[in-house]
Amino acid sequence: MKAWRFYGFGDLRLDEIPTPQLRPRHVLAQVLVVQPSVTEAQLAAGVRTLAYERIKKRLETEAPVQLFGHEFCVRIVEVGPGVTRFKPGDRVAARAKLPCEFCPLCDSGRGHLCRKGPIIGFQLPGCFSEYAILPENALTLVDDRISDNEAACLQSLSDSVASVETAEIKVGDSVAFLGQGSMGIECMQIAKVSGAGKIITVDVRDEACKLSKQLGADYAINATREDPVAAIRDLTGGNGADIVFECAGGSPTQGLAGTGSVSQAIDAVRSGGKIIGVSWFGSPFELDVDLLRERSLRYLFPDISTLEHLQHTVSLAASGRVNMKPMITHVLDGIENVPKAFEITANKGKFQAINPAQVRMAE
């Protein structure tokens, strides 16, 4: 089969490799649509972010290696021994982070808390290839009302569901979202159907602000023309939002907000409120913990998405309560266009993209 393999940072080549062998409790699947996540696009270029050191070590010791591709829709071709939930012909999507099944947490029925298991696309080969071997415990059926392109967004959407769950939104809470990329807009829509009251979004791109309003935000602030902290405080009677989702941070070299969005989130949330940290930064940075303590702020990080989150995500998308179609702005045809998808995803502002660029691999 054809598969993209990394020989180093920024060195991605389309190779002919053997089709992987089916294993117990796994399925062999044909890749229909795949997209690089923003994190994967950064890592592909050697930008420091989540898992940078682990990816660097794999490239130094194992290259050429199949990396990335955990956001996908695939069609099952064959099922291995022990697979009970799927059959050939089923369309499925996946969660990325899996339990190890052997640690004390997994042994005590708390595998959703395990952090020792593999991640599809990082420790396990992902789907930048014609076919993939995938573990059954990662997968869920895709509803017929969801297109292949929308299904490739379900993994990211399930992480957004986990983020909103972490916030424990109360009915009527005012909620602000710094950053309206794919996860920011996903979190916004999920918060809206989870009881949020006034919804305020912030971005630096007109197209993102416009889409945010289209998909349910009450107010969309362009931070290049207006002070977002002052605007959020003004819209909440001077108090600040009950909850602020920080979805804008990350490497400025790829159009993200650096660490400044964390300071904005702290200033924009009311005393006693919650900040939900969605972004990955790639390196440590200073944080005024005394300020958080003085104002009784809670800085919370989402749990990993579970199979239950993923299944709920399918329900949200199939019912239309969350609308992903307008977010999918760039779809490329053919496996040879994978590098272009990485380029667009790494430079979404330049290409006016909201969701990562997708590659349609097969019909």
Image (cartoon, rainbow, N blue to C red):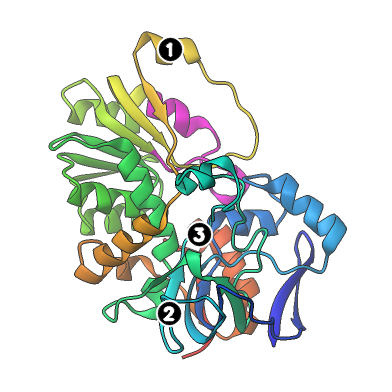
Q: Secondary structure at mark 2?
A: loop
**Residue 235 image-quadrant placement:** top left
Residue type, numbered disc 1 = Leu
Neighbor class of circle 3 (other Cα within 10 Å; few <14, some 14-19, many 20+) is: some
Q: Residues within 10 Å of mark 2 (few under 14, many from 20)?
A: some
Identify which amino acid the numbered label 3 is placed on: Lys
Magenta stretch contains residue 298: no
Instruction: Answer yes or no: is residue 307 visible.
Output: yes
Which of the two discs, 3 and 2, sits closer to the camera? 2
180 left or right of 114?
A: left
How far across and down, in percent of the image, does residue 289 sit? 49, 15
Which badge, 3 or 2, comes first in the chain's sequence? 2
Q: From the viewer's side, name the closer residue of 274 and 174.
A: 274
- The answer to whether mark 2 and mark 1 are in CB contact below 8 A is no
Relative vertical location of residue 224 with respect to residue 62 in this rendering, above or below? above
Image: 128 above or below 356 = below
- According to the image, label 3 marks what residue? 348
- State the residue in front, 8 or 251: 8
Real-space Cα distance between discs 1 and 3? 34 Å
Query: Where does label 1 land, which residue?
Result: 291
User: Which kind of residue does numbered mark 2 sit on?
Assistant: Phe
Q: Which mark is residue 86?
A: 2
Q: Earlier in the sequence, mark 2 or mark 1?
A: 2
Helix, strand or loop at mark 1: helix
